[in-house]
């Protein structure tokens, strides 16, 4: 990227309705698509766009986040001239942790001040997409905008929770709705914001001085009449994954070849933590169709329209249909699993019948025998 840009992945107070899937992990590290985590999409998009300095503002339950990101090597962010920084809350005080993202940005203002970069791209982790930020930066400059918000115009409902926005004929944002409300619009904010670093720091200090500490609700929404907030319409695939229904729906969408190719390879590849596993093993009794099966799996039964993460064992006579089975799951002999989400290390006993429905899939938490 020819412009000097730093990336910020903001995990503070992310909207999360994933029930037991986020009981022991933050939303950013929820497994997705057989081998990835949700944060991989924002992080890979930044790296593919030439952004080589990225800060992840962790908030709560970030042990799995630290383990997944490590030194940033899978994303080529472990070199001297680049860097991946995980910035947890500066205090353990629960009242301080519960404050908004602007407060936490202020606590780490030295990180921003030391970075000799002009622009900042702020994203969330629950927007599943593959985006090139370079044309967004270019559009930001052409419109002489103070802030550019990346949006998706989509007539059909988005299952996840996303803010709606209104834009005028010139693409300027005139209204922003929170996750609740009745704003009539088919344009949804992707929670991705581009602005100059100096403006961000000014908004941080000004808002905090006024007793406000939320970036969107306070610093941006309340200043739409004072700032030039421009919208940028993204045309690629978008999955908003912060509810159980949206998680299931967007995983199942990956079984469509056109969605898989667009999301994981255009405009660049999606990277994740590398785990060496042997190839999946299909025994003579196995039957697999229209499914994603990760390395290390052992298939003796039947799998249709499902996603199996690494190390899943489907024993003889077992049937998995329209379901998601995460890492190291074991499906006992002659069991039937349909429209279900099984977290990592779940073991299903023999001859069990577990059925959910597409609109409300059955969910089993990790480290559980059912």
Image: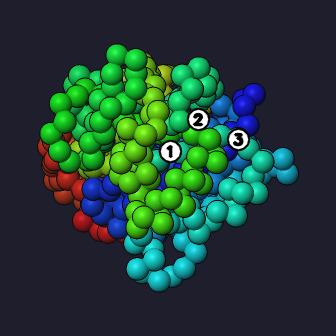
Task: Say if residue 319 shows up in the picture.
Answer: no
| Proximity of marks 1 and 2: CB atoms separated by less than 8 Å | yes
- Residue 249's place in the image compared with 81, above or below, is above
Please, which residue is most extreme toward the bottom here? Answer: 93
Query: Which quadrant holds the C terminus?
Result: bottom left
> Which residue is tagged 1?
123
Q: Which of pointers 2 and 3 indicates the residue nearer the eye? A: 3
- SS category of the residue bearing label 1: strand
Where does residue 196 sit, x and y in percent of width and height? 62, 41
Direction from residue 212 to residue 348 in the image, left or right:
left
- SS category of the residue bearing label 2: helix
In depth, the one of 247 and 14 nearer the eye is 14
Q: Which of pointers 1 and 3 indicates the residue nearer the eye? A: 3
Q: Which mark is residue 118?
A: 3
Q: Quadrant of residue 186?
A: top left
Please, which residue is most extreme toward the front here? Answer: 226
Where does residue 74 sit, x and y in percent of width and height? 69, 46
Q: How is the image coloured?
A: rainbow
**1 or 3: tag closer to the N-terminus:** 3
> Which residue is tagged 2?
45
Instruction: Measure the alpha-carbon separation of dots 1 and 2.
Output: 10 Å
At 38% from the left and 54% from the top, the residue drawn is 218
Q: Which of pointers 1 and 2 indicates the residue nearer the eye? A: 1
Direction from residue 324 to residue 360 in the image, left or right:
left
Instruction: Measure the alpha-carbon separation of dots 2 and 3.
Output: 19 Å
Q: Quadrant of residue 42?
A: top right
**2 or 3: tag closer to the N-terminus:** 2
């Amino acid at each position: 990227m020819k412009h000097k840009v730093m990336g910020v992945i903001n995990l503070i107070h992310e909207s999360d309705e994933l029930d037991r899937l986020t009981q022991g992990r933050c939303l950013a590290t929820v497994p997705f698509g057989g081998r990835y985590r949700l944060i991989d999409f924002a992080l890979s998009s930044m790296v593919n766009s030439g952004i080589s300095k990225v800060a992840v503002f962790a908030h709560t339950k970030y042990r799995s986040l630290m383990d997944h990101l490590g030194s940033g090597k899978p994303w080529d962010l472990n070199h001297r001239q680049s860097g991946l920084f995980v910035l947890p809350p500066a205090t353990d005080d629960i009242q301080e942790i519960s404050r908004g993202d602007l407060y936490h940005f202020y606590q780490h203002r030295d990180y921003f001040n030391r970075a000799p970069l002009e622009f900042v791209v702020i994203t969330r982790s629950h927007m599943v997409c593959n985006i090139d930020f370079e044309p967004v930066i270019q559009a930001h400059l052409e419109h002489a905008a103070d802030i550019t918000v990346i949006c998706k115009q989509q007539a059909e409902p988005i299952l996840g929770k996303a803010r709606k926005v209104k834009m005028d004929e010139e693409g300027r944002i005139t209204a922003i709705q929170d996750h609740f409300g009745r704003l009539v619009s088919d344009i949804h904010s992707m929670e991705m914001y581009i602005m100059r670093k100096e403006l961000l720091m000014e908004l941080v200090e000004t808002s905090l001085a006024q007793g406000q500490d939320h970036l969107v609700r306070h610093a941006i929404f309340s200043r739409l009449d004072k700032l030039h907030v421009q919208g940028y319409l993204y045309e690629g695939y978008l999955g908003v994954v912060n509810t159980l229904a949206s998680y299931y729906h967007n995983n199942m969408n990956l079984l469509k070849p056109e969605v898989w190719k667009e999301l994981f390879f255009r405009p660049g590849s999606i990277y994740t933590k590398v785990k060496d596993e042997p190839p999946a093993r299909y025994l003579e009794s196995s039957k697999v169709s229209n499914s994603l099966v990760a390395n290390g799996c052992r298939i003796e039964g039947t799998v249709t329209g499902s996603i199996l993460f690494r190390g899943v064992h489907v024993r003889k006579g077992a049937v998995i249909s329209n379901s998601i089975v995460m890492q190291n799951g074991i499906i006992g002999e002659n069991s039937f699993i349909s429209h279900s989400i099984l977290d990592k290390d779940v073991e299903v006993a023999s001859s069990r019948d577990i059925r959910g429905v597409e609109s409300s899939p059955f969910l089993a938490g990790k480290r559980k025998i059912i």
